[in-house]
Image: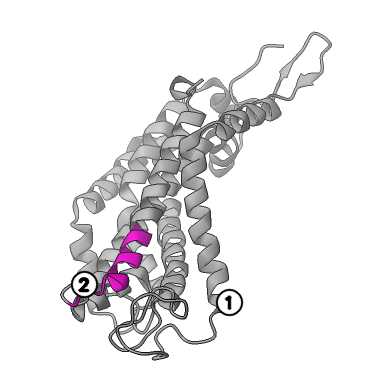
Amino acid sequence: MTSVAGAPGTADSAGSPEPVGERRFSETLHFARRNPKLLIGLGIVLTFLLLGIIGPLFIGHDPNEYVGPQTQPPSGEYWFGTTTFGQDIWAQFVYGLRSTFLIGVFGGGVAFVIGTAVGFVAGYKGGIIDEILNMITNVVLVLPAMVVLIVAIAYLEARGLFVQGLFIGLTSWPWAARAVRSQALSLATRDYVDLARLSGRRTWKIITTEIAPNMSSYLVMSFILLFGGAILIAAGLDFIGLGPAGGVSLGLMLQSASQWSALQLSMWWWFIPPGLGITAIVGSLYILNVGLDEVFNPKLREL
């Protein structure tokens, strides 16, 4: 039996199929365990994620509540000190981590869904459909995304976390769509896709079972980049005062520290934790992405 790219397996001399999928998974897992970039990036991201999930469970007060003396540096009672209003910065930090990951997942997820859907359809269908979708993608791509976000969110009465994430996703998908389209265009001409097309299978079935699985590693890395991008955009919006009303996030912490002159007052414990938190999370996501690229791409593997 002749093996076909994308087929579930090949046949050995006895006629039984070899577990190609399992072999590829084992090989990928082997290189993943040996890749320091992937391990370091994943470890830092998971540490902050667990802190954002578990940390708030051990805090018995609202993060914006005035609970202690004002402008206190870090101590055994207040690990990250207090603000000029007596708010616990540690409480704000762990709650802010939760908001940061939520906005990353939701905003990046919206952009990922739209971008991959447009990219797959445009790359597989081609022709007039490809031209129309490519035109829409280019129009959104040249729009000044941050300006559009500032104008849109500034005039909204409700500035919830998910509203912010929705607008971030609606303006962040074009580059993912173009990247997926280029990959789908190449895969759409493969023999196994032609066979699926001749068998009468529907478009969405061919895309989800024949094309997308062969791009799984690329899609994972695309989502990670969109995830990190959504966090950075949300932090920028929060810093200029367009964050969730009454919410807590790392960006809002930086905005409050700037508004109440934490730098001038030498209150380093107010602005350094959220700044380092955003930098560490986004930086670790990009390091993780580089590690995944080395694992999935045999040419980049460090043997």
Q: How is the image coloured?
A: one colour
Residue 128 location (% of width, % of height): 33, 39
Q: Is residue 197 left or right of residue 162?
A: right
Q: Is residue 56 left or right of residue 239?
A: right
**163 or 270: nearer the viewer:** 270
SS at badge 1 = helix
Mark 1 vs mark 2, foreground winner is 1
Residue for point 42% across, 48% down: 285
Residue stretch rendered in magenta on the structure: 265-278
Secondary structure predominantly adopted by residues drawn in magenta: helix
Residue 61 location (% of width, % of height): 50, 87
Image-quadrant location for residue 196:
top right
Residue for point 27% across, 70% down: 268
Q: Is residue 1 left or right of residue 84?
A: right
- The type of residue carrying mark 1 is Leu
Could you say which disc has been placed on residue 48 in the image? none
Report the label total: 2
In the depicted structure, whether residue 251 falls above or below residue 188: below
Could you say which disc has been placed on residue 57 in the image? 1
The residue to which callout 2 is attached is: 240
Residue 280 location (% of width, % of height): 38, 54
Q: Looking at the image, which residue sits at the far front?
A: 76
Whether 168 is among the magenta residues is no
SS at badge 2 = loop
Q: Quadrant of the N terminus?
A: top right
**290 or 8: nearer the viewer:** 290
Confirm whether residue 169 shows in the render.
Answer: no
Confirm whether residue 24 shows in the render.
Answer: yes
**257 or 195: nearer the viewer:** 257
Residue for point 47% across, 69% down: 98
Badge 1 vs badge 2, beta-carbon distance below 8 Å: no
- The type of residue carrying mark 2 is Ile
